[in-house]
């Protein structure tokens, strides 16, 4: 977590990125081309892979992913995603280049 300082700061930045995108998209934890971890938001069909970045983790923030349960509370959905739904072993495997899927 040296990139973000702490898990709480990572979580804050991830939630902010996910809630600031207007409309459909995704919020990603990526390994950038320079080897640094970054949180990025993409809209519509844009993907980090198109830009040479490696996807480690993604949260779908298209309305179909959360609207029935959370309606306009996207922030609540992203918080629940981070607190209860993320498969951190899968994300770590992506970082380390492990191709075996959990």
Image (cartoon, helix red, strand yellow):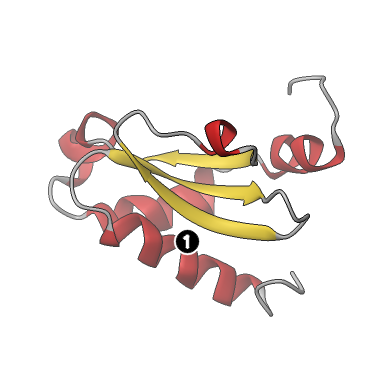
The residue that appears at 41% across and 52% down in the rendered structure is 80
Residue that protrudes farthest toward the top in the picture? 100
Expressed as whole percent of the image width and height from the top left, the position of residue 37 reads 68, 58
- Pick the residue in front: 2 or 86: 2
Q: Is residue 12 left or right of residue 74?
A: right
Q: Is 88 rendered above or below residue 64?
A: below
Q: Is residue 96 left or right of residue 75?
A: right
Expressed as whole percent of the image width and height from the top left, the position of residue 66 reads 26, 38
The residue that appears at 41% across and 58% down in the rendered structure is 79
Location of residue 2 (image quadrant)? bottom right
Expressed as whole percent of the image width and height from the top left, the position of residue 97 reads 84, 33
Q: Is 92 rendered above or below residue 45?
A: below
Q: What element carries label 1?
A: helix
Which quadrant is home to the N terminus?
bottom right
Q: Is 86 rendered above or below residue 7?
A: above
Residue that protrudes farthest toward the left in the picture? 72
The residue that appears at 67% across and 51% down in the rendered structure is 32
Disc 1 residue crowd, few under 14, some 14–19, many 20+, Cα 10 Å: many
What residue does disc 1 label?
Answer: 14
Q: In this view, does 53 lie to the left or right of 60?
A: right
- Pick the residue in front: 85 or 43: 43
Location of residue 5 (image quadrant)? bottom right
- Pick the residue in front: 49 or 18: 49
Location of residue 3 (image quadrant)? bottom right
The residue that appears at 18% across and 44% down in the rendered structure is 23
């Amino acid at each position: 977590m040296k990139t973000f300082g702490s898990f709480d700061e990572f979580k804050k930045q991830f939630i902010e990125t996910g809630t600031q995108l207007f409309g459909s998209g995704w919020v990603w934890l990526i390994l950038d081309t320079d080897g640094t971890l970054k949180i990025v938001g993409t809209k519509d069909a844009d993907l980090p892979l198109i830009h040479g970045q490696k996807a480690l983790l993604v949260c779908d923030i298209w309305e179909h992913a959360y609207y029935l349960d959370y309606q306009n509370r996207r922030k609540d959905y992203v918080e629940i995603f981070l607190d209860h739904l993320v498969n951190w072993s899968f994300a770590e495997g992506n970082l380390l280049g492990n191709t075996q899927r959990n």
